[in-house]
Image (cartoon, grey):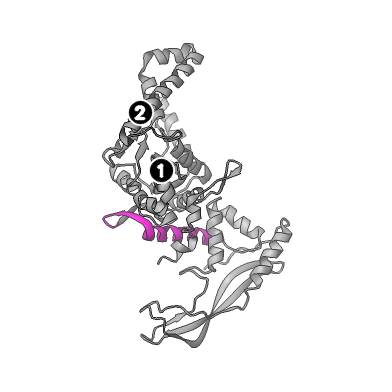
């Protein structure tokens, strides 16, 4: 087993670092003896059996090197089935450090790459290796797939983010959990993007140069992964996520759409894979406008010779498409729809492209991308401050989600 590299204490944030390390040192040699039900038979008739087990709560960085903060966990025994187990303690299964440290690693990994998360923890005087953070992210994603995976023939193809956030399997159940919001129109959007694999853009550049010399058609995009998701714009939360090392197809679209049962309509970009996945699909007005403008010879002529007039006509075309969209929606719901309902996938692309931008770095494997994308979906869905001001988030008010909900779900 590789030992962690020696680290020097940073010179920044000395007051905060000292406060954190002093707080963590208060756990040193603490004993956990709180009883809990038997994990085998569920009986609460348990007794203390006398033994104790040492565990590393965390590892801090001092001026002289690393120091392990060790706690002691009391051993219990069930009087019914004689099973031996340990008392209630803040540790997740298969994690060397305590639950608060693991939660901190996951929260940091959602905001930055793992090497930067390691550096941030070092600033706080906490030693957690980059590979350990990677393992925690992987463990969280695997347990999330067990808790809320959308599977086909035993293979998890997508993750029900809505279930992780709210406990509801789909929007229909969510309406019962949110009585006030449940009476409103709840639309959804679905979209996909293709983050490039590490080194693929450089490879594509060289390949396209060769194709150009040979007079062949260039490659449209570099080799990459499929990242698809669904989003609930009025609630500002993600509903499902799919990250695969394959082209987007009808089966993946079916998996993504499962949590959207109960939505009033779903806006998609015209990708054929979505056809037949649900009955209330609607075409994105922006994608429709692009297709119409591209095929209109008059607009293309204006684009070359009179850009100002082209922009005005282009905007007028979109206004007409939006008006038709709202008229069709009014016929379906039987009343004028409220203003501000999404007519395009822009709200989704805002989340999706924002997620693609926040990934910040390309990935070699689909597992690494999937681990980070899930954490980003959760982070984006749990915002309480956006655009320079606080925002009301009904999902946060439900107080359902926690990292421990997933990490302990084994």
Residue 365 visible (yes or no): no
Residue under the image location 60 percent in, 78 percent down = 30
Which quadrant: the C terminus?
bottom left
User: x, y percentage for residue 21?
Assistant: 67, 66
Residue under the image location 72 percent in, 67 percent down = 63
Magenta part of the chain: 129-154
Residue under the image location 40 percent in, 87 percent down = 79
At mark 2, the secondary structure is: helix
Q: Is residue 51 magenta?
A: no
- Disc with the residue nearer the chain's start (2 vs 1): 1
Residue under the image location 43 percent in, 57 percent down = 141
Question: Are there few (<14), some (14-19), or many (20+) residues within 10 Å of tag 2?
Answer: some
Find disc 2 in the rendering and name its residue. 327
Q: What numbered label is drawn on residue 184?
A: 1
Inter-mark Cα distance, 2 to 1: 18 Å
Q: Is residue 145 magenta?
A: yes
Residue 255 visible (yes or no): yes
């Amino acid at each position: 087993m590789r030992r962690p590299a020696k680290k020097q204490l940073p010179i920044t944030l000395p007051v905060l670092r000292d406060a954190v390390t002093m707080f963590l040192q208060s756990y040193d040699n603490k004993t956990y003896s709180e009883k809990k039900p038997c994990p085998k038979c569920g009986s609460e008739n348990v007794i203390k059996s006398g033994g104790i087990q040492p565990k590393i709560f965390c590892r801090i960085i001092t001026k002289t090197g690393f120091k392990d903060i060790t706690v002691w966990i009391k051993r219990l025994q069930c009087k019914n089935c004689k099973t031996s187990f340990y008392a209630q303690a803040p540790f997740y299964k298969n994690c060397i450090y305590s639950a608060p440290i693991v939660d901190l690693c996951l929260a940091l990994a959602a905001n930055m790459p793992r090497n930067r998360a390691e550096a941030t923890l070092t600033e706080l005087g906490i030693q957690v290796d980059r590979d350990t953070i990677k393992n925690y992210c992987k463990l969280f994603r695997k347990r999330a797939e067990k808790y809320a995976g959308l599977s086909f023939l035993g293979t998890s193809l997508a993750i029900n983010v809505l279930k992780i956030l709210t406990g509801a399997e789909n929007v229909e159940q969510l309406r019962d959990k949110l009585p006030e919001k449940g009476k409103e129109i709840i639309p959804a959007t679905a979209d996909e993007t293709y983050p490039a694999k590490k080194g693929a853009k450089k490879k594509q550049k060289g390949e396209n140069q060769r194709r150009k010399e040979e007079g062949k058609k260039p490659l449209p995009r570099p080799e990459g992964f499929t990242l698809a998701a669904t989003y609930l714009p009025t609630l500002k939360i993600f509903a499902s996520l799919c990250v695969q090392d394959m082209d987007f197809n009808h089966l993946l679209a079916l998996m993504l759409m499962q949590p959207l049962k109960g939505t009033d309509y779903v806006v998609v970009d015209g990708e054929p894979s979505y056809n037949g996945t649900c009955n209330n699909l609607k075409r994105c007005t922006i994608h429709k406008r692009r297709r119409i403008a591209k095929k209109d010879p008059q607009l293309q002529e204006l684009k070359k010779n009179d850009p100002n007039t082209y922009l005005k006509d282009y905007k007028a075309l979109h206004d007409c498409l939006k008006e038709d969209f709202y008229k069709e929606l009014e016929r379906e719901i039987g009343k004028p729809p409220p203003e501000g309902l999404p007519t395009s996938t822009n709200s989704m692309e805002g989340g999706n492209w924002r997620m693609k931008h926040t990934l910040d770095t390309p990935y070699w494997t689909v597992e690494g991308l999937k681990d980070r994308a899930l954490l980003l979906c959760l982070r984006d869905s749990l915002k309480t401050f956006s655009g320079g001001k606080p925002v009301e988030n009904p999902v946060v008010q439900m107080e359902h989600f926690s990292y421990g909900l997933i990490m302990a779900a084994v």
